[in-house]
């Protein structure tokens, strides 16, 4: 790992990029790689990427490269005091070769599509086993013992005991089924918003609220300078300050298609209804979720979170309740010997009312709420699941005395692409930031 000081914003060191062919031949790709793209996503269980090669040595035929090779990659942002968090180090399987073409008489280009070893092993592994344990313990066994991962595991504790039989399905399929029903063992009102994703640091099975609780990992700004750097400091042209500013500056940003009212109504973000049917006692119960009533039930990304919609305006147009916009039906059973869902020590009956409606509303908020897409000078510290704070200056004439947009504030990094140009030693990050609230007050609109 490099221990030199960073000379400019976005500088990166490609420490190695090796390929191991099916015939056991090892080759260094560092001198023929043009670009490396690495993809992370909190809604995706796999860490993937592609490597664009300009091949003047005919490696694709000599090794040969068939689409079944191992690739080892390690890169890092230069730091005077490097740490293990400041590195991307992964082992991939090359699963396909695309866009192969001749670009001159002595050179050809192609792209190597890669995915981490665990995500490929998952496709050939099946879990056929019974469990009576907490969901976090089941997930640990599935990933560590059934899949056989060697990656670090970040697994958050879950509430209660679950009795299941895994019906010969892939490990990731089982974990993704369990995440829908997982309820955190700690936190305000035991949140049910679990995610399963792979990032540069390993495999993560964690609640959204735990991510929200983490401190801000970076403070970014879209402007000439950040507000915490004095004009005097910038006047001195200190290279360290200039580099630090460059690392925090958003090069470009755009707003996603957000807050589609019809989509949010249809997908149950504003309200929904759950009917549970006890097939043994021949009875049913009804539960409902209401966006405004339940808004502060669980932790949100902003400490002073406010709803993105104005309740008074909703009432003014007589839209009423949204409980019937999304209706779910879930079977339960009151038989003692069939109780198989959650409990502390003892098993108890299924409790879908604890997770179905709230989880569907939260996922809708993340996918259709406040979204900002940014590009910035890259670093190998940032990863999906991080919390960042951004400042976006006011555009146009300001009538409220504010200096920054109401869209500024804390965001969750939900998607991220590391774009690395090794020959130029340049690294950019393209990220999608999301949040489940706003900080804007609607009091002026209540009349």
Image (tube, rainbow, N blue to C red):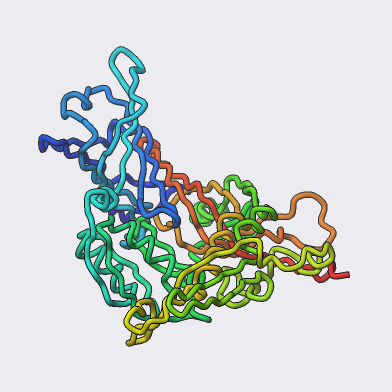
Query: The C terminus appears in which quarter of the rendering?
Result: bottom right
Residue 270 lies in quadrant: bottom right
Q: Is residue 367 above or below residue 70?
A: below
Residue 189 at x, y percent in the picture? 52, 81
Taking the image as shown, residue 121 lies to the left or right of residue 408, namely left
Q: Is residue 114 visible?
A: yes
Taking the image as shown, residue 436 lies to the left or right of residue 185, namely right
Residue 283 at x, y percent in the picture? 52, 78
Query: Which residue is painted at 19% across and 24% down in the image?
Result: 61
Residue projecting furthest to the bottom: 345
Residue projecting furthest to the right: 447
Residue nearest the viewer, comparing 405 with 248: 405
Residue nearest the viewer, comparing 332 with 73: 332
Q: Is residue 178 above or below residue 234?
A: below
Q: Is residue 215 visible?
A: no
Residue 286 at x, y percent in the picture? 58, 75
Query: The N terminus appears in which quarter of the rendering?
Result: bottom left
Taking the image as shown, residue 211 lies to the left or right of residue 337, namely right
Q: Is residue 238 above or below residue 351?
A: above
Residue 209 at x, y percent in the picture? 50, 72
Query: Which residue is painted at 56% across and 61% down in the image?
Result: 411
Query: Which residue is painted at 21% across and 37% down in the image?
Result: 68
Residue projecting furthest to the left: 24
């Amino acid at each position: 790992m490099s221990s030199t000081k960073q000379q400019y914003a976005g500088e990166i060191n490609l420490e190695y990029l090796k390929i191991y062919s099916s015939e056991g031949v090892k080759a260094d790709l560092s001198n023929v790689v043009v670009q490396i793209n690495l993809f992370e996503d909190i809604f995706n269980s796999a860490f993937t990427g592609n490597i664009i090669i300009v091949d003047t040595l005919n490696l694709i035929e000599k090794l040969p490269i068939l689409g079944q090779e191992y690739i080892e990659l390690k890169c890092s942002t230069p730091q005077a005091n490097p740490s293990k968090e400041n590195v991307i180090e992964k082992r991939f399987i090359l699963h396909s070769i695309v866009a192969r073409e001749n670009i001159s008489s002595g050179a050809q280009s192609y792209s190597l599509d890669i995915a981490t070893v665990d995500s490929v092993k998952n496709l050939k592994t099946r879990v056929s086993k019974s469990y009576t344990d907490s969901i976090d313990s089941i997930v640990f066994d599935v990933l560590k013992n059934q899949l056989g991962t060697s990656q670090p595991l970040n697994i958050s504790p879950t509430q209660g005991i679950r009795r299941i039989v895994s019906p010969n399905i892939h490990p990731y399929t089982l974990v993704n089924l369990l995440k829908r029903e997982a309820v955190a063992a700690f936190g305000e009102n035991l949140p049910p918003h679990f995610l399963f994703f792979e990032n540069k640091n390993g495999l993560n099975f964690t609640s959204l609220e735990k991510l929200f609780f983490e401190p801000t990992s970076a403070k970014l700004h879209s402007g000439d300078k950040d507000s915490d750097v004095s004009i005097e400091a910038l006047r001195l042209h200190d290279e360290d300050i200039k580099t630090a500013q460059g690392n925090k500056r958003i090069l470009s940003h755009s707003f996603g298609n957000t807050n589609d009212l019809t989509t949010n109504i249809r997908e149950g973000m504003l309200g929904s209804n759950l009917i549970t049917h006890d097939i043994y006692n021949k009875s049913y119960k009804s539960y409902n979720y209401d966006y405004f009533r339940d808004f502060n039930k669980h932790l949100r990304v902003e400490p002073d979170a406010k709803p993105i919609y104005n309740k008074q305006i909703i009432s003014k147009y007589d839209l009423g309740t949204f409980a019937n916009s999304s209706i779910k039906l879930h079977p339960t059973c009151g038989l003692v010997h069939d109780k198989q869902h959650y409990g502390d020590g003892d098993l108890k009956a299924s409790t879908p009312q604890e997770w179905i409606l709230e989880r569907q509303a939260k996922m809708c908020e993340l996918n259709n709420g406040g979204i900002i897409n940014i590009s910035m000078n890259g670093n190998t510290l940032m990863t999906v699941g991080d919390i960042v704070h951004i400042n976006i200056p006011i555009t146009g004439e300001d009538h409220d005395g504010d200096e920054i947009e109401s869209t500024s504030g804390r965001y969750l990094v939900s998607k991220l692409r590391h774009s690395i140009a090794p020959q130029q030693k340049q690294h950019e990050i393209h990220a999608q930031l999301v949040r489940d609230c706003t900080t804007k007050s609607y009091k002026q609109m209540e009349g």
